[in-house]
Amino acid sequence: MSVRVRFAPSPTGFVHIGSLRTALYNYLFAKQNNGKYIIRVEDTDQTRLVEDAVEGMIRSMEWAGILHDEGPFIENHKIVQKGEYGPYIQSERLSIYSKYVDQLIDSGNAYYCFCSRERLDDLRETQRSRGETSRYDGHCRNLDINEAKKRVEEGEEHVVRLKLPENKDITFEDVVRGTVTFNTSDLDDQVLIKTDGYPTYHFAVIIDDHLMEITHIIRGEEWLSSTPKHVNLYEAFGWEAPKYVHLPNILNSEKKKLSKRQGDVAVEDFNRKGYLPEALVNYITLLGWSPDDEREIFNMSELIEHFHLERVSKSGGVFDVQKLNWMNNHYIKEADDDRLTQLAMKYVIGSGIINDEDEKNKYDWVKSIVVLVKEKLDYMMQITQYVQEFINDEIEVLEDEAKEMIAMEHVKVLLTEFDARLKDLEKFDAESIKQVIKSLQKDLGIKGKNLFMPIRVGVTGTVHGSDLVETIKILGKEKTSKRLNSIIIKL
Ligand code: GLU
């Protein structure tokens, strides 16, 4: 039987990096088994839908390079569905579910429940005040089926509930957790069909996974306690359940589940800041899975080769943004300069440092800055602060260390002479600039720190920075001169 796996997001907004990891593990497992990776949209909770969330999700996945074989795709700004097991959007499958509900009711594995919201609220309140977990008390469990059907036909508001056997152990195998057992006395008679006629997740997921011939369910551990209900439903239908793989949570530094409150957790946030998708993918794969050696850097095809479900850990990995930054910096250093520059342009224009019309003229200039500073970047958005440093014609010296450097006696002559010799250059390239500095060393008898630091402060205002000669080259003859003079005048 060939492997078929699915990522089944509910379109409730942004894509959490935990969801990206779930999608990724599904994808890697499918690809290494020549199987199919499917996206199915679980939108049966109509109250939680967020407009455009499906498009956003698909775009995030495309950005990350986690490409599905079946499901919804975006073509010409529209969602189109591809694959032989569709529709892949649950709200378009309502007619499919209804037939299976009848089957469950007739076989005694589900029942109509007419309890009003008030009754259920009171029940919950009473259970809470007694310190009990809130669950349905079985009030409608044993209604006469014909009586119940009549009430339904008469239009009485109702839901359909799963009829779990009493006090029965339900056991299943989980690839990560081994044998897992729950007793039905700890489980609720789950609502399968809501008053609005929509199935709940628990019902739709069973029907769809079965009809879509899903072989492995790889999902977050928050679904583990729902699995016995699902297993019970498979049994009720006489279907074979898929294999289960419950992934550990991604944790924050306090070892709690990573949530939006702790800063960036959405794939969109990382995309927006200019993280490279291959870095994010590489990093999140390691939050829950580890290879059998110390290796950390993997591209997608290497992940497909090395990833193993058997090595997914039970305990969650801690999301460490420093580590992600380190990895992203690694990928930035390796990336093609034009790719980085195109990304950089977006930020440089977005922050207003240059305008749209200048885009073509300034491309090479931005590229030279990217090449100069890329080893310092954690993510591409940071490029703006570096580009900004090349903008002003005049500079201010604010740091004490820098002030000391230009307070030295020889500095006025040094900078004046430097300016004059640069002006004489025909070619303003790195080699010529280097020669000018060398000639100053020889002619003025100044060397080392006393030579380089005042020049650096004279052109940048600070003692820190990237390669000096490259910086001067990028600034250009005119701006370098203006900057030097804005300092010289104050000496
Ligand atoms: N729709 C569920 C979610 O949003 C999917 C759970 C599953 O994979 O079964 O997480």
Image (cartoon, helix red, strand yellow):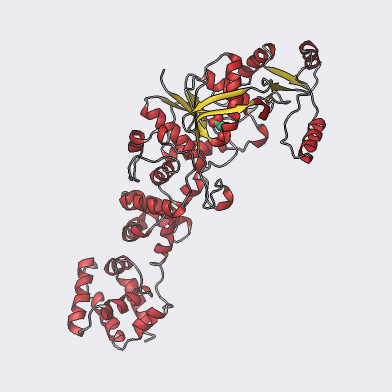
The residue sitting at 79% across, 33% down in the picture is 123
Residue 464: x and y, percent?
36, 71
In terms of depth relative to the viewer, which is nearer, 344 or 398? Answer: 398
- The reply to whether residue 285 is visible in this rendering is yes
The residue sitting at 41% across, 38% down in the picture is 65
In terms of depth relative to the viewer, which is nearer, 148 or 95? Answer: 148
Relative to residue 11, is residue 121 drawn left or right? right
- The reply to whether residue 90 is visible in this rendering is no
The residue sitting at 76% across, 27% down in the picture is 137
Position of the C terminus, as image quadrant, is: bottom left
On screen, 472 above or below 242? Answer: below
Rendered-image quarter of ligand 1: top right
On screen, 92 above or below 296? Answer: above
On screen, 212 above or below 366? Answer: above
Relative to residue 194, is residue 397 drawn left or right? left
In terms of depth relative to the viewer, which is nearer, 393 or 138? Answer: 138
Position of the N terminus, as image quadrant, is: top left
Residue 77: x and y, percent?
50, 34
Residue 362: x and y, percent?
36, 58
